[in-house]
Amino acid sequence: MGESMLRNALLLDAKGNPIHQDHKVFSDDWDEIKDWSSKVYMPYDVSPTGKFDRPVSTMHSAMIGRITVTRFAYGIPVNIRDWSQDAGNAVVLTTIGGTARHWVDTDNAVETPVGGSFVVDCSRTDYNVDFDPDHLQLNLTIPHRVLEQVCKDWFGFVPGDALWQHKCRIGGENSSWLALMHYVVACLAEAPDRLAHDRAGRHLEQTICIHLLNEWAARAGLGLDDPAQTLAPKTVRLAEQYMTDHAASLPTMGEVAAVAGTSIRSLTAAFRKFRNYAPSDFLREQRLQGVRRDLISSEAGKTVSMVAYRWGYISLGEFAKAYKARFGERPSETLRR
């Protein structure tokens, strides 16, 4: 299977006819591109990084069940960051032209040449990527809830953030993942409407998710088929929901345990077993993510101290230290963007 199949993905059907698109497929207008990308991926911040600041974008998309498949390029080198966590999506970016440089953390990045893929759950962690001027991507946007449901149905449990916050490269030349992507493209060429609207699409959606989860978990050092793993108990899920909903009010662990109907000791043990971290770690993450969302928002007149106090931080020095350790930049830098 040659590279040409992927490079021409979503352009023509099996009979050589153009695959219908309900939107413009080429644009040099930043607002048009932003509107399209916000719908098929999620809102994010993009900025040109070369001498040209006017995009020459190509935009094609199709659906496989609840997975959005896109063929996309800006036509100029760009940096993309601050992908919306509220959108609730994971993305798998496969390079079919040029090169992409994905930042795993503030100091380390991995490149995906043609045929390489990178997976990141933007609903659970931050993401920063640089694309060179020749980049062309074949991407999958998968709702986090779909991945969770597949885990529950196939593996009997929902993994914690040890998986969802792990950003990594998968696939590559001669890999089974790349072979699957070729198959996906061939299926879209044969029957794009069926994959979008009937059970054939749901079956292929499930195949994609199962393969992705196994590849992803292997690189995260997790065993999805480990018989010791079971679905996290109701106490853990109740505690997570309560802490997510009330993170700004800084609930005590006693209050969280009471809502979950258990003791602090038992709740902590359950989190350690099923999530590999303490409930206080989960609460800390929700607060930091809440601060980041508010700093990025368009709220007029906000300051770092105002947002920090809103999320229960008293010592601005300790808050700033924790924020930079988590996101690799000072809160004031996030606010200025």
Image (cartoon, grey):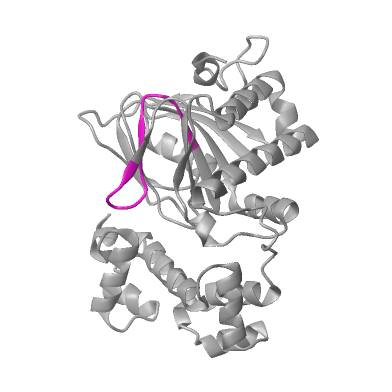
- The residue drawn where x is 38% and y is 60% is 297
Residue 163 in magenta stretch? no
Question: Residue 308, located in which quarter of the rendered image?
Answer: bottom left
Q: Is residue 75 left or right of residue 96?
A: left
Specify the farthest residue to the top.
16
Question: Residue 230, located in which quarter of the rendered image?
Answer: bottom right
- The residue drawn where x is 71% and y is 54% is 155
**Where in the figure is residue 54, as x and y percent of width and height?**
29, 29
For the N terminus, the quadrant is top right
Question: Residue 185, located in which quarter of the rendered image?
Answer: top right
- The residue drawn where x is 35% and y is 25% is 75
**Where in the figure is residue 144, as x and y percent of width and height?**
59, 52
Specify the farthest residue to the front.
227
**Region of the chain picked out in magenta, as a range:** 93-109
| Residue 39 higher or lower than 315, as above or below | above
Q: Is residue 65 left or right of residue 111?
A: right
Specify the farthest residue to the right.
199
Q: Is residue 225 left or right of residue 179?
A: right
| Residue 300 higher or lower than 74, as above or below | below
Judge whether residue 70 can be spotted in this image.
yes
**Where in the figure is residue 184, as x and y percent of width and height?**
64, 27
Q: How many marks?
A: 0
